[in-house]
Amino acid sequence: MNETHVERMSAMARPRSVFLIMAVHVAILISTSCGSRSSEHSRKHVAFFIFGDSFLDAGNNNYINTTTLDQANFWPYGETYFRFPTGRFSDGRLVSDFIAEHAKLPLIPPFLQPAGNPHYFNGVNFASAGAGALSETFQGAVIDLKTQLSYYKEVMTWLRSKLGNVGAKMMLSRAVYLFSIGTNDYMSLFLTNSTVLDTFSKSEYVGIVIGNLTTIIKDIYSRGGRNFGFINLPPVGCLPGIRIINPDNNGNCLEEASSLAKLHNQALSKLLQKLEKHLKGFKYSIFNLNISLRQRMNHPSKYGFKEGKGACCGTGKFRGVFSCGGKRLGKEFQLCENPKEYIFWDSYHLTERVHKQFADEMWGRANNTNSVVGPYNLRDLFQTL
């Protein structure tokens, strides 16, 4: 396959002024679309609230004091669909963007995106790249899950002021709440000099992560939330950026990292079954990202890809060095000619094409969907009445 070798130099990067102008255009488009729908509070209207990490971050980290390790507001991010960087960690759209499209909603805006007249009737995206269920995960550089919940409470207050208590309660009870969180709680153990596993066993640490997530879910439920979607964790040790940590591993998956994700996914499934049993009206959909991603990595051609392990954008073996864009771990990086042929966009994140396939599975429109999503699919949750 022909590859284009690109130096990440300031001359090649799109001017910041262009990014800001384009970002304003997106904000106006979203605001206009949301505004046109603000009066459409029919019984069919279902809002979409998004919590999590870089898998779902639509640009919140553009507006916080952090490093480029947790930002994607520079070229070539966004090149495939938006044609400019939006802050999404992909070449284009994310799962949440495609789910919104399936639900006939506009792009759900980041909570921190500046707007003169914000509209939250369609929902809000609170996700932050690098975030974990634990506040200690990359603390100070990201918006942790607890803080995302506090932002949600602000939105609740705004909705009550616009719709009244009864109207807001009805809207929030019909809304769908999507979560993708936990990957960074485990990945950070291998990317930093963490000694956490010297203090806790793997199962104990997983229990702490799941415990924090449980608190957030129950809080949203207590405020009226009933329809929850969850994306479980990928095989963390098989991400290009983790494969290269141990040079003696010959490029194989780092099983210690993947085993933590496996324990987490088992605990998450048990938790959701328990909540469904004990919380009246609690409905959930869980997407088995772990299995679905493994299937594509192991058999890329079956799903229309040519490369299942290496990234489109990055440096070194598997392009596992997190250098995409030239503003992180080095100024030089390699960029593939066609992201659609790749599963991984950069060292840790997926291409738009994979996000689209996953969204179709989560919605319930793909083949073999029943094996990777349940007990409800997201279409079921958006059509609760």
Image: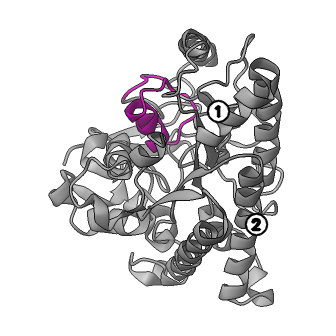
- SS at mark 1? helix
Mark 1 lies on residue: 171
Is residue 97 placed above or below 309 in the rendered structure?
above
Can residue 303 be seen in this snapshot? yes
Can residue 90 be seen in this snapshot? no
Q: Mark 1 or mark 2, which has the lower sequence index?
A: 1
Which percent across, then down, holds residue 154? 82, 34
Which percent across, then down, holds residue 225? 67, 47
Which percent across, then down, holds residue 165? 80, 29
Picture colour scheme: one colour
Q: As rendered, which of 277 and 370 lies closer to the eye?
A: 277
Amino acid type assigned to the residue bearing label 2 in the image: Asn
- Number of the front mark, 1 or 2: 1
Quadrant of the rendered image containing residue 39: top right
- Say whether residue 342 is magenta: no
Q: CA separation, marks 1 and 2? A: 26 Å
The prevailing secondary structure element of the residues shown in magenta is loop
In the image: residue 136, left or right of residue 185:
right
Which residue lies at the image location 30% right of the left edge and 63% below the top edge? 370
In the image: residue 324, left or right of residue 335:
right
Range of residues picked out in magenta: 81-107
Is residue 335 placed above or below 106 in the rendered structure?
below
- SS at mark 2? helix
Is residue 246 placed above or below 128 in the rendered structure?
below
Mark 2 lies on residue: 212
Which percent across, then down, holds residue 383? 44, 40
Which residue lies at the image location 44% right of the left edge and 43% below the top edge? 95
